[in-house]
Image (cartoon, rainbow, N blue to C red):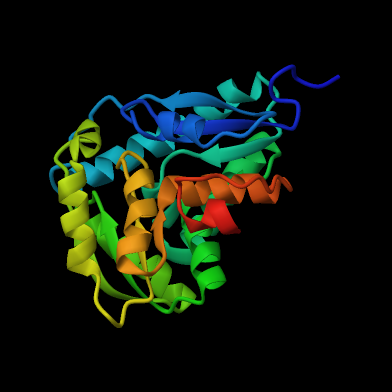
Amino acid sequence: MTDALGWRRKFGVIAPSTNTIVEPDFYRMTVPGVTSHFARIHIRDQNMSDDAGMDRLLEQIRTEIVSACERVLTCEPDYMVMGMSAETFWGGIEGNRQFVKQIHDVTGLEVATGAEACRRALELFGAKRIGVVTPYQPIGDENVIRFFGELGFEVAAIKGLRCPTAVSIAHVTEHELRTALREVDSDDIDALIQCGTNLSMVSLADEAERWLGKPVIAINAATWWMALRDNNINDRIENAGALLRDH
């Protein structure tokens, strides 16, 4: 017997309780027979106005994530998807590996992370020099640079938007994001990456690929792409960037 709606795959998704963007993004990019089922990590203190605040936010995620995984397991998902990105970059390659191992040890399932999805996308596009936009404080940007650097990519430019709270990430306007993309772009940049699953970037990234003439990888689109392709679901999705349309 298979699930009446998730007859191809059921994805268990973990997201912070403060995130209002990743869930509708994933629903908008869904395909027939695939369903996503969210468990929320309770964020009690969403202040991230400085490095210490961002560290506290990550500590809350680490404390709560096992319980969130255990809750979503009760719907018997086939695969796990991380609807958050900062923790998947933390500590470079080894930090990401340990994070994935933790989720696998708890759930017994394979897992899509934003960091790994971005790696796959950059390798697919043959990119070497990248520009990055994040909602993070400097400590977050440092971990993003470390992760990509350890993989052999050069972060030639990065723009951290320094969002003061976790909820306020979703308040960043399209104009601000468009300005940030242009700030980290130049002729010698091969691709642009947007981190932070609570930034609303999927539609803008799709448009920006046309006016910049290069890959613009929105992390929610990349993570969803990884989840689908890992499960041999190759449906073409429009208006979410080249990854989901052409790969």
31 or 160, nearer to the observer: 31
Q: Is residue 189 visible?
A: yes
Image position, residue 91 (x, y; %): 41, 60
**Residue at image coords 45%, 76%:** 127
Image position, residue 25 (x, y; %): 43, 35
- Give left or right: position of 148 versus 5: left
Name the image quarter holding the C terminus: bottom right
User: Vertical placement of 15 versus 238: above or below?
Assistant: above
**Residue at image coords 39%, 52%:** 206
User: Vertical placement of 25 versus 96: above or below?
Assistant: above
**Residue at image coords 16%, 48%:** 175
**Residue at image coords 81%, 22%:** 2
Q: Residue furthest right?
A: 1
Q: Quadrant of residue 110?
A: top right
- Give left or right: position of 89 versus 46: right
Q: Is residue 162 visible?
A: no
Q: Quadrant of residue 211?
A: bottom left
User: Vertical placement of 119 versus 243: above or below?
Assistant: below
Q: For the image shown, how many numbered marks are present on the structure? A: 0
Q: Quadrant of residue 48?
A: top left
Image position, residue 166 (x, y; %): 24, 35
Name the image quarter holding the N terminus: top right
71 or 159, nearer to the observer: 159
55 or 86, nearer to the observer: 86
Image position, residue 182 (x, y; %): 20, 64
